[in-house]
Image: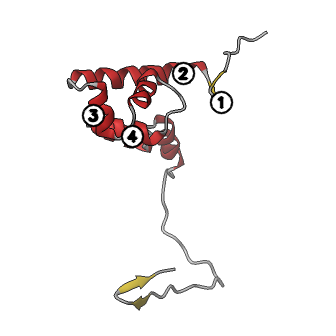
Amino acid sequence: MTDTPKITTTKGNVVHPRVERGLRKLGEDISLARRARRMSAQDFADRIGISRATLHRLESGDPGIALNTLALALHALGRLDALVDLADPIHDHVTMMQLREGVPKRVNKARKKAGAETVEIVEKKTDDKFVGF
């Protein structure tokens, strides 16, 4: 028998244990960052436009918190760039490896096939903007 993690539900949200731990750590880190900046919970909540109860849920790692709330909190802490770059392919080793593997080893000059029709792309100028294909 395999050991599968017990997926729990919290207020209608299905949460994997690793996700739950990650959200809890994220909330604790936001709380620490807020306190390191000497901001009270009420001042921080007012600054990002949420209630004190919602801030408590965010800092507790509640999986039902809106992504917008997380983004607002990170922005107020000067850390929005961390969220924006989170899934950037340049930071994803798997994506970068697959892109590298997809690059051809050699590139030959394209040759015209005998009897093949050539298509000419014509750009039309409309209102000082080019309309492409």
* Residue for badge 3: 77
Q: Nearer the viewer, residue 86 or 61?
A: 61
Q: Secondary structure at mark 4?
A: helix
Mark 2 or mark 1: whose residue is earlier in sequence = 1
Mark 1 or mark 3: whose residue is earlier in sequence = 1
The span from disc 4 to disc 3 (Cα, nearest Å) is 10 Å
* Contact, mark 3 vs mark 2 (Cβ under 8 Å): no
Q: Amino acid at mark 4?
A: Ala
x and y percentages locating residue 20 in the rendered image? 54, 21
Q: Secondary structure at mark 2?
A: helix
* Residue for badge 4: 71
For the N terminus, the quadrant is top right
Q: Which mark is residue 20?
A: 2
* Residue for badge 1: 12
Mark 3 or mark 2: whose residue is earlier in sequence = 2
Q: Nearer the viewer, residue 53 or 86?
A: 53
Relative side of 127 to 122, left or right: left
Circle 2 residues within 10 Å: few <14, some 14–19, many ≥20 = some
Q: Amino acid at mark 3?
A: Leu
Eye-nearest disc, 4 or 1 = 1
Mark 4 or mark 1: whose residue is earlier in sequence = 1
Q: Nearer the viewer, residue 62 or 90?
A: 62
The span from disc 2 to disc 4 (Cα, nearest Å) is 18 Å
